[in-house]
Amino acid sequence: FASELDRRADLTSEGGTMAVMPSQSNARYRAAVTFRLRAVYALGALLRGNPAAQRAFVAGGGPELLVRDALGTLSSVRGPRTDASLVGLDRKLASKVLSLGEDVATDAALHAEDYGDGGDGGPSPGAIVGSFTTEAWCDLALRMLSSPPGDGTAGDVAGRGIKERALRSASALGPGCAASTGDDSWGVEEVIRVRSE
């Protein structure tokens, strides 16, 4: 996982945020994203409701690796003939990652007594919440609120579900994102826009 992120980082253009994906067949790409979706599902099963696993995940830098991968997936450029279903798969993966981050941060905030004070060397509940409200996580939340290119069809049920999950995550992570960015109105415009759609 880390080596894939390092490979993508090497492909990132200087000063830019868009990684150019090597050409590969749609079937291979779909299989790779499906595998990553399953990995995020398994990671969520391990982390949700498990303070010891959450502390180890945060101590090992897991949140940063996870959000870098999700943002890299959303920034991938595949060329002019990209299959629209691949864009949907990318957004689904990023949505699952964002939901996992929200769940872990909420769990740590609501059940702080289960985590101890962090005095035994592990991250405190505040540090766990903080690791899921960094600039990258806040950026992911806002990017998931925006419409993907070519979106807007009335029957886009999957897209609406992704936006609803993103709205819930942005609302849950909002106070931490406002604190970490120093912007008390973080995400307010985006949330109002999505709610009015």
Image (cartoon, rainbow, N blue to C red):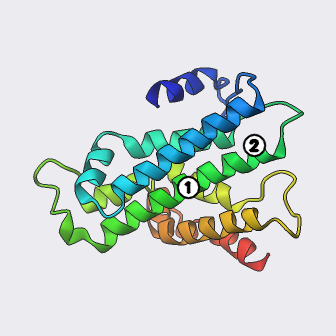
Q: Position of residue 89 (x, y in %)?
A: 69, 47
Tell me: 67 left or right of 59: right
Q: Is residue 141 above or below residue 8?
A: below
Q: Position of residue 90 (x, y in %)?
A: 68, 45
Circle 1 sits on which residue? 96
Instruction: Tell which of 18 and 157 is nearer to you.
Output: 157
* Residue 104 vertical position relative to residue 19 in the rendered view, above or below: below
**Which residue shows up at 65% across the image and 23% down it?**
14
User: Regarding mark 1 in the picture, which secondary structure is present there?
Assistant: helix
The residue lying at 10 percent from left, 51 percent from top is 120
- Residue 31, picture quadrant: top right
Residue position marked by numbered label 2 in the rendering: 86
Q: Residues within 10 Å of mark 1 (few under 14, many from 20)?
A: some
- Specify whether residue 14 is in view: yes
**Residue 152, position in %: x, y?**
86, 63
Which residue is more in the foreground, 132 or 3?
Answer: 3
Residue type at mark 1?
A: Lys
* Residue shown at the point (56%, 46%) measured from the top left: 37
Marks 2 and 1, the one that precedes in the sequence: 2
Please state, as top left, top right, bottom left or bottom right, where the C terminus lies in the image: bottom right
